[in-house]
Amino acid sequence: MELGLNTYQQHEQIDGEKTLGRISLNSADMYKVMHLDGRESNAIPKKRTEQFLVGDWVTLDPQIDFDLINERLPRYSTLGRITGEEYRAEQKCAASNIDQLFICISLNKNLTDSRINRYLYALKKDDEYQTSVVLTKSDLTSDSSKIAAQLAAKLQVPVFCTSSVTSDGIEKLRSSILPGQTVSFYGNSGVGKSSLINVVAQKEVMATSDISAKTDKGRHTTTSSRLIPIENGDFVLIDTPGVKSIGVGANDLAQVFPEIAELAKNCRFNDCRHLDEPDCAVKEAVQNGTLAQKTYDQFLALQKESELTQGYLDKKLAKKLNQKAEFKKQTINYHRYRKPPM
Ligand SMILES: Nc1nc2c(ncn2[C@@H]2O[C@H](COP(=O)(O)OP(=O)(O)OP(=O)(O)O)[C@@H](O)[C@H]2O)c(=O)[nH]1
Ligand SMILES: [Mg+2]
Ligand SMILES: [Zn+2]
């Protein structure tokens, strides 16, 4: 079991004879680490304040019945989302060093255009990992393949249509995962992420529980991310806790709204935001019916929200950097201080 190490080494160099491990569980800052022989042990960071993500590669100092985590190796990708609104906005990460992301959307009330657009906009990072949409619980509706085909024609990403009950679509999903890859499942609570992982793994590795009949929503059964190596296939899965909301920051709207990006080439201004600018090809397309009003509205809402949220995040980051610089200045002054001779 190489736990995705070969893929990691295609991105980052590892030197020396260090003992390596991969963080496999992070629950309330208690860590488990997986070794290359498949053994899992408890792990404690050497620097108590340092935080790790499931998927992180770390160097270890083995002790008798646990491991000390020495150092985190650089991440080549991070799966995360923005939580909280306005000045409470912050980035919350669920996993690292992943090669593929499966955004899981259930074929019940969970499936809406705006949710898919929002999730793609917030999570798709082409320079870090591949993104696909996985429609779950296809056994609940008779027109699941039609819905999947319509979405696949519209979206710029692969769409899988699966059922953990009938195993429909599972082989296709499984064969899209290449040996050595690390793949994470992400989405709302109750959409069936852990159930999918159990069928892909072909054994009960994750607990699952019923969704509420009243709200059609899950019960947050998975409470922390979990790394699951699949020997038969030689890849690694990461299950994640169900997300409540996903905020949007700066990303490329063109990735999610290709038809708007195409139209925008004919706007008078290169940086047209398609609001009140003159000669806006996007607005013209809405007026003459070539672009759906609904798509345009969703685009504008995401554009507005992402600009606002990114503004808050930038301000926060600037404040943090300022504080860091101030702290550094103070410590330098402190070190320079010499007691005057008596
Ligand atoms: N009909 C049907 N039910 C499913 C399917 N997959 C999962 N379920 C049910 O949906 C419920 C929630 O499934 P989980 O796998 O626990 O969902 P989850 O996304 O891991 O939820 P959290 O861990 O709370 O984020 C369970 O009762 C499953 O039996 C499916 O393909 N079809
Ligand atoms: Mg779960
Ligand atoms: Zn325009």
Image: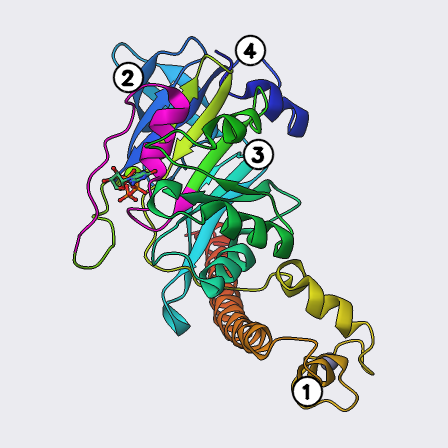
**Residue type at mark 1?**
Gln
Which numbered tag is attached to residue 17? Answer: 4
Q: Are marks 3 and 4 in contact (CB under 8 Å)?
A: no
Which numbered tag is attached to residue 287? Answer: 1
- The percent coordinates of residue 104 (x first, y second) are 43, 45
Q: Are marks 1 and 4 in contact (CB under 8 Å)?
A: no
- Residue wearing tag 3: 99
Return the residue found at the far front.
142
Residue 42 lies in the magenta-colored region:
no
Q: Which residues are magenta?
A: 186-213
* Disc 2 crowd, CA 10 A, few/some/many (<14, 14-19, 20+): some
- The percent coordinates of residue 121 (x first, y second) are 55, 59
Q: Residue at x 76, y 72 (%)?
A: 263
- The percent coordinates of residue 287 (x first, y second) are 68, 87
Q: Earlier in the sequence, mark 2 or mark 1?
A: 2
Which numbered tag is attached to residue 199? Answer: none
Q: Main secondary structure of the magenta part?
A: loop
Q: Are marks 4 and 2 in contact (CB under 8 Å)?
A: no
Spatial CA span between label 2 and label 1: 65 Å
Spatial CA span between label 3 and label 1: 41 Å
Spatial CA span between label 3 and label 4: 26 Å
Task: State which mark lies toward you, 3 or 4.
Answer: 3
- Residue wearing tag 2: 66
Task: State which mark lies toward you, 3 or 1.
Answer: 1
